[in-house]
Amino acid sequence: MPPDARCDAGLSRRPAEAPQTRGVSEISSGTLLSALVSQSSCLQATRRRRKKAWPLMNVLGLSFDYHDAAAAILVNGAIVAAAQEERFSRRKHDKALPEQAIDYCLKQAGLRAVDLDKVVYYEQPLLKFDRILRSSLRRGKAGFAYLKDTAAAWLREDKFEPRLRIAECLNLPLERVVCVRHHESHAASAFYCSPFDEATVITLDGVGEYETATIGVGRGSELRTLSTIRMPHSLGLFYSAFTAYLGFEVNEGEYKVMGMAGFGQPDRHDELLRLFSLQDDGTFRLDQRFFEFTAPNDLPYTPALPAWLGPARPPESPFATTEGEGLDAAALADCRRYANLAASVQKCTETVILHMVSRAVERTGIRNVCMAGGVALNSLANGRIIRELGLPLYVQPAAGDAGGAVGAALSYYHSASGGKGRRPLTSAFLGPAYTPDEIAAAIRDSGFEQVECFDDDDALIDRTAQLLADGLVLGWFQGRSEWGPRALGCRSILADPTRPDMQRAVNERIKFREPFRPFAPATPVDEAVRFFDMPPVGGAAAPEYFMLAVHPVREEQRTAIPAVSHADGTARVQVVSAQSNPLFFALLQAFGQRTGVPVLLNTSFNLRGEPVVETPTDALKTFAFSGIDALVMGRSIVHKSFTL
């Protein structure tokens, strides 16, 4: 689709004008103050509308400019569509204004841009820059150099006023575009999507404008903040600093740290925890001696960190903790040190999260807990909240910055409408679906000739279950794509978890990624407690439906499902019901009837470094360039005539 056709959904866009940029020296504190006052007035005007009940409202929420750009659309309070730009652009963590995601959302809702009552951006950028300005100036010469580079980048990328760019893209008057605060977006995405009438609401991430975490209360249509934690005290940035130290990319490799942690022992947990001062109100402060969060050049930690813990792990270096993997004794010792540190960082993070949650619940007196922000994707911590604290938990499926698009739209809608038409988000299938004709055309154009076609779902499921039981690895492409980072049975790679060699085979032959990375088990909801040490799943919005909680594999079942049992005996569990995903549920049952184990290895349908597949063409390309044995797409199964 040409760029001019993406955002307008049938409308003509105004000719783009050259952006009016200024030199770094011209960004005065007075200019920033007047802009901040303007944004604050806009937000206050939004809040004054709370008492006015609107019978119908179309709201588009957007997040972009930093990472994981996304769009989401509400029609009278219901989330009709949501998608990340990377799924369409094929650029991992695409941060650009999400024109293709906007176009999809409008089409799915049957709307044009002119039909939108409001477009809501997920944070207030001038407040963010004000924080950068103030913290940089406090750092002296080094801070000024960082400020100069950052301001130049903001001017070059036109980050100071996203409202103007949005209004131009959609050909809307500027007054229809508003901003809400970053953690307000996170809190709204967690509470308003939850099944709870009231809840303790916690947000945790790297940093928004000033805040890195918040504790609040949600009741009905109201969200109230009780406490905030501000830069530089950040649990998200603490975890990211160690992500970089362990040789992984920040904002991409944090889940690799969780995977590496399973191979180690948390022998430095107590030392790391002493860096935190845990407060009685649930907040914390972080010792800054080892970190550089306010004006980082290349790394978010100082030379004091490797001086304390030893040399950092080189990126892409081999990793193994047992002999026989081709590493000499010194390299093996280093890998064990890295694994132990990853385990220590992970356990320390869990300790802080559990402290924050338990103290917040004590303060509010409300046991229901809602969480969002990138740290809320820490599924090991989520599992402990469920098992050890025994609290009902809701985590928004796209808890990171992408989910800010949903939260921004919900925050505005509930402020303006008084909470009319609130609906819990119990399905993450908010992306595009493709017709049988579109799938057939993609297969025909791909050149693959060995194709089985089926007249009904029962025959398709029967054949697919048999292929999996025979040991084939399958691509699985069905229905609407998932919202959030997890593949939940619509854009998945599936395999038999009972085969001990399957984890390594999928990592190395299919995904082309590190061999230590774990895979998730998917199982019918009623079978979960048979295989995993976890309480019964509570409700259709539980974290396990979105693959957002890790639980121990029952000891007697670890040999039954070795390919999804991690080195530490845990698994990131996905449960499926006949209501949540009927076709995938039927496949799990059919596989269980053949093998006695109603569990499948489920991982996202993508290769290393690529976004999850979106279209049938994406799926066929990934199939062609990987070791996937067959591709199940709609009611067709595509086979290869050769094996990689």
Image (spheres, rainbow, N blue to C red):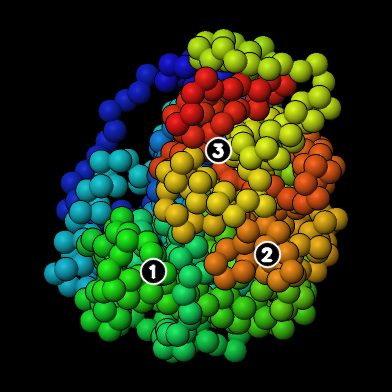
Label 2: which secondary element: loop
**Residue 445, disc:** none
C-alpha gap between disc 2 and disc 3: 25 Å
Q: Nearer the viewer, mark 2 or mark 1?
A: 1
Q: Read off the residue under disc 1.
A: 323
Label 1: which secondary element: loop
| Chain-order first, disc 2 or disc 1 | 1
Image coordinates for residue 511, horizontal then vertical, percent: 47, 42
Residue at 35% of width from left, 23% of height from top? 16
Residue at 50% of width from left, 63% of height from top? 259
C-alpha gap between disc 2 and disc 1: 22 Å
Q: Read off the residue under disc 3.
A: 605
Crowding at mark 3 (Cα within 10 Å: few <14, some 14-19, many 20+): many
As shown in the figure, which amino acid type bears the numbered disc 3? Phe
Figure quadrant of residue 334: bottom left
Q: Residue furthest front?
A: 324
Q: Read off the residue under disc 2.
A: 558
Residue 586 appears in the figure: yes
Q: Nearer the viewer, residue 565 or 340?
A: 565
Image coordinates for residue 233, horizontal then vertical, percent: 42, 76
Image-based side of 513 in relation to 390, left or right: left
Residue at 63% of width from left, 67% of height from top? 570
As shown in the figure, which amino acid type bears the numbered disc 1? Glu
Q: How many marks?
A: 3
Residue at 60% of width from left, 15% of height from top? 450
As shown in the figure, which amino acid type bears the numbered disc 2? Arg
